[in-house]
Structure formats: C-alpha cells, structure tokens
Image (tube, helix red, strand yellow):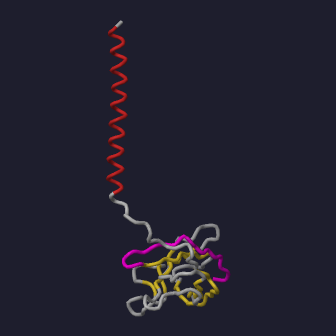
Amino acid sequence: MKRNNKKGISEIVSYVLIVVIALGISIGVYSWMRSYLPKDNNNSCPDDVAIFIKDYNCNNKILNLTLENKGNFDISGFDLRISNESDKAPIISIQSTKQLPDTVEGTIPGIPGRYYFYEMIPFSPNSIKVASFNYTNQEKILKIQIQPFIKDNSSLYLCTNIVNLDLENC
C-alpha cells in the first residue's frame, strides 16, 4: 500500500519539475529576445502624415504624379508600387525618371519605387510636388499604391497611411 502512494508522489514531483524547467526556459528566451528589440518606440511615423494624389497623367510610358501633402508633418519620401492587373494588389516597383546622384530629388539607383524628396527642402504640409516615373517595362498600369515614409537620421519609418488609386488610360 505504501509503495503505490510513493509512486504517485514521484509522478507529481516529475510534473512539477517539467513545468518549472519549461517556465525557466521561457523566461530565459524572453529576456534574450527582449535584448534584440529597440529600447524606445517613440520614433515612428505619426498618424497625421497624409499624402494625396492631386492629379496624374501618362504620356509616352511616363507616369507623372502631382502630389499634395495633406498631413501635419514633413514627408521624406514615398514608396510607389504598381499593378498591371485590376484584381491584384500593386507589388511592382518602377524607377523614377530622376536619379538621386545627379539631382537632389528622386530615386536612388538600385532601389526602384522609393522616391526621396530633397532633405533641405522637405515635402512640407500643404505643398505640392510632381514626381515622374518610367514604366517602359510594363504594358499598362491599372493601379498604383503610395506609402509615405519619414527618415530620421539613419532610420526610415514607413507610414501606415497608404494611398491606393485605380488609373484609367495608362
């Protein structure tokens, strides 16, 4: 009779040990992963960042976008993606007609779709700018998507205010 009781207690002790070991490992993994996260999350794209497509036109495989900053903050640039199918989300990046090394505004070579505004004269609230993109590799454009970003020192923060537009005659 006493033997059976001891066997039951040893099983309970083994379960408690397994739970304690699992908790110890999870606490260790949590503290290790926490060291890889940034310390402050204050730097991000504010909610009041808003870019608006005022007008567009497509001539000779060049897409000209007239953009207006409708938000309350300066915008450092935007990512442009296109789609040549009406039922698919825009995922194709196209190159700006301006290359940054030659001018003060445009796309860095090798990063198609990412358009930077001149840092000394940012895209400030209530201002209007025109950006041109070359889509010679595409037959047509049916949708575009613009996602603004803010650059702070060496960090780039993508904004959640994404603009989608269906195009006609492009």
Q: Which residue corresponds to the image point at 58% horizontal and 90% vertical from the top-left?
A: 128
Q: Extreme top residue here? A: 1
Q: Which residue corresponds to the image point at 60% horizontal and 67% vertical from the top-left?
A: 88
In the figure, residue 34 lies in which quadrant? bottom left
Report x, y in % for residue 45. Answer: 49, 73
In the figure, residue 86 lies in which quadrant? bottom right
Report x, y in % for residue 74. Answer: 51, 83
Is 9 on the left-hand or right-hand side of 147?
A: left
Report x, y in % for residue 161. Answer: 57, 72
Q: Quadrant of the N terminus?
A: top left
Choose between 12 and 88: the one closer to the eye.
12
Magenta stretch: residue 69 in it?
Answer: no
Is 67 on the left-hand or right-hand side of 118?
A: right
Choose between 165 and 58: the one closer to the eye.
165
Q: Which residue corresponds to the image point at 51% horizontal and 87% vertical from the top-left?
A: 123
Choose between 44 and 110: the one closer to the eye.
44
Choose between 62 and 80: the one closer to the eye.
80
In the figure, residue 53 lies in which quadrant? bottom right
Q: Quadrant of the C terminus?
A: bottom right
Indicate whether 26 appears above or below 160: above
Is 33 on the left-hand or right-hand side of 123?
A: left
User: Do we see residue 109 in this rendering?
Assistant: yes
Q: Extreme right residue here? A: 168
Q: Which residue corresponds to the image point at 63% horizontal and 86% vertical from the top-left?
A: 56
Q: Which residues are magenta?
A: 152-170
